[in-house]
Image: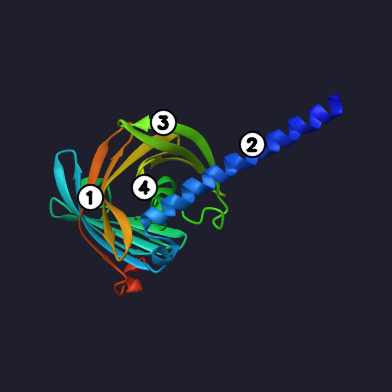
Amino acid sequence: MRTNRFLLTIAAGFMTMAAYAQTVDEIVDKHVAALGGIDKIKAITTIVADRSLAVNGMDIPTKTVLVVGKSVRNESTAMGNTMLQVLDGDKGWMVRPVQFGGTGEPEDLPVDQLKQLAGSLDPFGGLVNYKEKGSAVELVGKEKVDKKDVFHLKLTSKEGLVVDQFVDANTYLINKTKVAIAGQEGQIDFSDYKEVEGVKMPYTMDIANSQMSMSFITNKLTVNSQVDEAIFKRPVK
């Protein structure tokens, strides 16, 4: 009798785990569908975004050119100076004007900034095709964020990076993420989703950490335009 109870307990435990895993996948599947579906997501290969960056009382025009999964270039202009951050494959470089502590010449991107920039190569988020990427997703629970019901998912990449994703329980779009890089926790709030070529994208991103906060407002977003990949190459003296 005790043996039967023991086996039933184990079976019930496995059934609970299976249902729990299925719930995670149901949430992720609804999230992907809310974005527009996997076929439309995969159809987007390049993104060019013109944005305004509000930080420390300044409004900084910023242009991002992205080849999905491969390369990204961020170019900002402040006080007549141009700043660049570029990632091409696994190599990154930047240009910082002298007024902002740089040399005005191309230099290597610091490791922490390299990791942050690498995240932008996947503009639709780590939940999309997470299994194919070698990531794991855990359902932490259902919570309230800014008075909205959200599913709190913990995503762990194959490299070990942990990202807390908060999926709106009504729209199934992400409204907040939290991640710690180089020992510093950062948070991004996503809002003002708009559909571009059948895929919903956030037009407002509010970013904050212990040192500063900033807001990205998208003014124009173009997908699948021709991109000259020479713009990602580091200039050679």
Measure the alpha-carbon separation of dots 2 and 1.
59 Å
The mark closer to the camera, 3 or 1, is: 3
Query: Which amino acid type corresponds to the residue marked 4 in the rendered image?
Result: Leu
Query: Badge 3: few (under 14), some or many (20 or more) residues near its Cα, within 10 Å?
Result: some
Measure the alpha-carbon separation of dots 4 and 1.
41 Å
Query: Which amino acid type corresponds to the residue marked 3 in the rendered image?
Result: Glu
Q: Earlier in the sequence, mark 4 or mark 2?
A: 2
Q: Which image quadrant is residue 213 in?
A: top left
Measure the alpha-carbon separation of dots 2 and 3.
21 Å
The mark closer to the camera, 2 or 1, is: 2
User: Mark 2 highlights which residue?
Assistant: 16
Whether residue 143 is visible: yes
In this picture, residue 2 sits left or right of residue 166 = right
Q: Earlier in the sequence, mark 3 or mark 1?
A: 1
Q: Earlier in the sequence, mark 3 or mark 4?
A: 3
Instruction: Indicate the secondary structure of the residue bearing disc 2.
Output: helix
User: Mark 1 highlights which residue?
Assistant: 98
User: Mark 3 highlights which residue?
Assistant: 143
Query: Badge 2: few (under 14), some or many (20 or more) residues near its Cα, within 10 Å?
Result: few
User: Mark 4 highlights which residue?
Assistant: 173
